[in-house]
Amino acid sequence: MTKQELFEHIKNKKSFLCVGLDTDITKIPQHLLKEEDPIFEFNKQIIEATKDFCVSYKPNMAFYETQGAKGWISLEKTINYINEHCPDIFTIADAKRGDIGNTSKMYAKAFLENLNFDSITVAPYMGEDSVAPFLEYKNKWVILLALTSNSGANDFQLNEMYSTFEKGIDVNSPLEKGARGIELYQQVLAKSKSWSTPDNMMYVVGATKADMLADIRTIIPDSFLLVPGVGAQGGSIEDVSKFGMNKQCGLLVNSSRGIIYASAGQDFADKARIEAMTLQKEMEILLEKYL
């Protein structure tokens, strides 16, 4: 999917909602456990209930890998169902991979070719050569971890460093004498800009860090941002939109638990639909306000 196609879907649906399919077999409604594949059945009903209100689905790999081979089959059935029944939906493999080049090449093949996801989340800690294999696929996306919403983000991401990079300036430009350092996540943003373009690289920025989005936009004004942390984690869609939206929206805001676990009963899909519709209506207003 191209950047323009994604933007067109956002405009058509008046939504930049991403639904996280973090499907925990211990939390899905009990009546589904009698199904041959409870995880897939749950996902299928969530997809059918929410597909009118979202532009993206994001299965988190951990929830499938924990089930072993059965979980991988459920994942494969889920992505195939989305691609067949919702071909306009942008799919994200929330895998957070990142390793030496040969290993990354195999991860890229697994998720972007074999499973045919539109994108994959990647950890940039090992540098450009660990990310490059994911960028070789036409019309596929890399979503780099930049600034996450967990408390541990303070351990490294927000550490101030003296660096050869400046916010909003060429990545090879040295800091002026006496200038303060920049935070590590800002260095990741600045450096990674040279690896690709906003046409196939996005960044993860947590919704609970919404006040930092203005600074982030000085470094990557044209890139899409995948924004987790809305809903159960307390992030504000209003703040994210105010500080993070660009001329092509530039946002995919994820909600997982708040939608898929809105009910644990027979009405789980109906309740998920209501939650997704509520977020979409809010996003429609924000698109009119800030786009």
Image: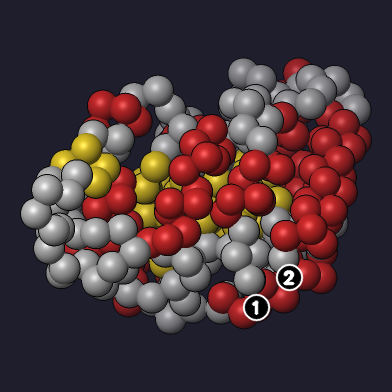
Image location (x, y in percent) of residue 235: 62, 33
Which residue is the site of mark 1?
A: 5
Q: Closer to the camera, 28 or 120?
A: 120
Distance Cα–Cα, label 2 vs label 1? 6 Å
Q: Amino acid at mark 1?
A: Glu
Q: Under tag 2, what secondary structure?
A: helix
| On screen, residue 274 above or below 78 | above
Quarter occupied by the C terminus? bottom right
The residue shown at (87%, 31%) is: 271
Q: Which residue is mark 2?
A: 9
102 on left or right of 85: left
Residue 281, how many percent across, how many down?
A: 87, 49
> Residue at horizontal 43%, vertical 81%?
138
| Three-letter amino acid code of the residue under disc 2 | His
| Element under disc 1 | helix
Asked which quadrant contains residue 203, the reply is bottom left
Residue 127, label in figure: none
